[in-house]
Image (tube, rainbow, N blue to C red):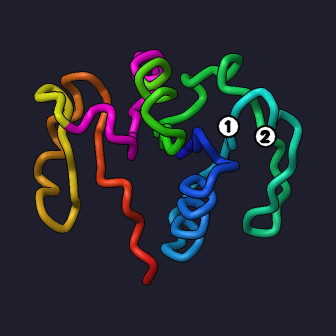
Amino acid sequence: MDIAIVGATGNVGRKLLEVIEKLNFEFSELYLIASDKSIGKKITFKKKTYSIVGLSDFDFSKVKIAFFSAGSVIAEKWAPIAAKKTIVIDNSKHFRMNKEIPLVVPEVNAEALKLYKNKNIISNANVIPDH
């Protein structure tokens, strides 16, 4: 499964990478996406170096899941665009009160995941545990 992380250079994006590594989350291809000012920067993850790509040029049909960790302003504009081509998991507050988008805390209401098909977006709490 190919995945993308939008906001990969920010604090939450970097923490998400740590969690993915710690949980040994399997993926085939990883795309790290950030603002235009970060395009071309390098991030090493699991002994591989990735170049940051820009959000405005990214083709979301390349990935099965796009994790949005870039805040509400980015989520409001870009998550619906991405959701036309992939599943979006957003941890900003933007979609949390939207009745058509499930707010999922896996340990509490994992069954709500099946509701993502309404908009192809899943909202989650933006607190990433530090186990």
Q: Residue 89 location, x and y as percent? A: 38, 41
Query: Residue 87 lies in what quarter of the image?
Result: top left
Q: Earlier in the sequence, mark 2 or mark 1?
A: 1
Question: Is 27 on the left or on the right of 96, as rendered?
Answer: right
Query: Residue 99 lies in what quarter of the image?
Result: top left
Question: Is 96 on the left or on the right of 85, as rendered?
Answer: left
Pick the residue in front: 35 or 40: 35
The residue under label 2 is 52
Residue at image coords 15%, 35%: 115
Amino acid type assigned to the residue bearing label 2 in the image: Ile
- Packing grade of label 2 (10 A; few <14, some 14-19, many >=20) is many
The residue under label 1 is 33
Q: Residue 91 location, x and y as percent? A: 39, 46
Is 20 drawn above or below residue 90 in the view shown? below
Q: Does the magenta stretch include residue 54?
A: no
Q: Residue 85 location, x and y as percent? A: 46, 20
Amino acid type assigned to the residue bearing label 1 in the image: Ile
Query: Residue 24 lies in what quarter of the image?
Result: bottom right
Q: What stretch is highlighted in magenta?
A: 80-96
Residue at image coords 32%, 40%: 93
Q: Residue 6 location, x and y as percent? A: 58, 39
Circle 1: element type: strand
Pick the residue in front: 19 or 30: 19
Circle 2: element type: loop
Q: Does the magenta stretch include residue 93?
A: yes
- Packing grade of label 1 (10 A; few <14, some 14-19, many >=20) is many
Can you say which quadrant of the picture contains the C terminus? bottom left
